[in-house]
Amino acid sequence: MDDVRSTAELLARARRVVVFTGAGMSAESGVPTFRDDLTGLWARFDAEQLATPEAFHADPDLVWGWYEWRRARVRRAVPNPGHLAVAAIEARIPHTVVITQNVDDLHERAGSREPVHLHGSLFAPRCIGAAPHPASVGEPADDDGGRIPPPRCAECGALVRPGVVWFGEALPGDALSAAVDAAARCDVLLTVGTSGVVYPAAEIPRVAARAGAAVVQVNPEPTPLDAVCAVNLRGTAAQTLPALVS
Ligand code: BV8
């Protein structure tokens, strides 16, 4: 029996499912993955260098401009058939938890109820003042961006930063414990579109495997997660996931 069919059957029998997604989930919506080469103005930068508190403090206009460019791209993107298939899995299997490393809102726009965002969101900017709090900002500048001075908090005047988790920053405790708990209790974990190299998020599929769940990977390329997967579906999110719920 082919792997797609056997995975569809596994899902049909599952009572608790985790769908764990990375940047590849949104690639077919036109959102570049984290390790795609950056393009345009950003081609000379490395995402991992820009996604740090040090980069923001050294050059807030550059880093804020990069996130505004990304926010504008996500605004223009639409959920792909892979996102819709994840929402269909949730509709069919009540105990489904979607855990994403992505900072876009495409799972939500596809109908996923409350995805767990391990790395925050492009749409949750916050003030970096003494008592950090959410800050509201307008629509992103819809051009190729470049340097854009970050806004100032209307309440206290401090700089506003993107509401994402940068390298070297701790993940939100509640999100991480919810993710570990779901992974430890699920029957099946689908890992989709992640290179499995960013920690502690990359531990999530490994927690599921150690707890005895069947881990299935959807990725056109091999990754370090191959070693913990019962099945490796070599394909893209938008092409493979719909076949698991048809
Ligand atoms: C922390 C938000 C400590 C920002 C991101 C061990 C333990 C703990 C930490 C570490 C550790 N070892 C190293 C670290 C440090 C570091 C780390 O993991 N570094 C890596 C590079 C080695 N981790 C951290 O710094 C974390 N913090 O540990 O803090 C601490 C503790 C207490 C107190 C203080 C501090 C924070 C990590 C979070 C960083 N923020 N994002 C932003 O987006 O700008 S991570 C970033 O990478 C994105 O969120 C992205 O999602 C994530 C992971 O990448 P992927 O999603 O996997 O994307 P990638 O491009 O790599 O791969 C795409 C995949 O999709 C590929 O496999 C490709 O083949 C596939 N694909 C392509 N097209 C498709 C597809 N698949 C399906 N369909 C397609 N169409």
Image: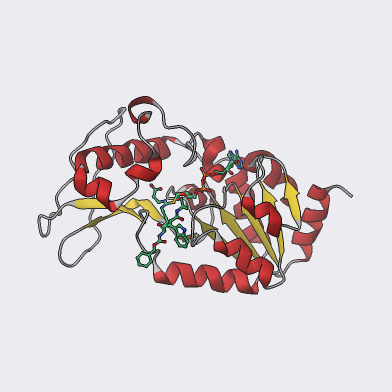
The relative height of residue 171 versus residue 39 in the rendered view (above or below) is below
> Residue 28's image quarter?
top right
As drawn, which residue projects farthest toward the right? 1
Q: Residue at x 25, y 60 (%)?
A: 134
Comparing 233 with 237, the one in front is 233
How far from the left and from the top, in percent, is residue 198? 49, 54
Residue 246 appears in the picture as rendered: no
Q: Residue at x 29, y 38 (%)?
A: 140
Comparing 78 with 70, the one in front is 70
As drawn, which residue projects farthest toward the left? 157
In screen coordinates, is 91 left or right of 160? Answer: right
The relative height of residue 183 versus residue 23 in the rendered view (above or below) is below
Q: How is the image coloured?
A: secondary structure
Q: Residue at x 67, y 47 (%)?
A: 218
How far from the left and from the top, in percent, is residue 164? 35, 54
The relative height of residue 240 versus residue 132 in the rendered view (above or below) is above
Comparing 193 with 109, the one in front is 193
Comparing 137 with 6, the one in front is 6
Residue 243 appears in the picture as rendered: yes
How far from the left and from the top, in percent, is residue 32? 48, 36
Total of numbered circles in the picture?
0
As drawn, which residue projects farthest toward the top? 40
The relative height of residue 208 versus residue 31 in the rendered view (above or below) is below
In screen coordinates, is 43 left or right of 33? Answer: left
How far from the left and from the top, in percent, is residue 114? 49, 62
Q: Residue at x 66, y 57 (%)?
A: 190
> Residue 243's image quarter?
top right
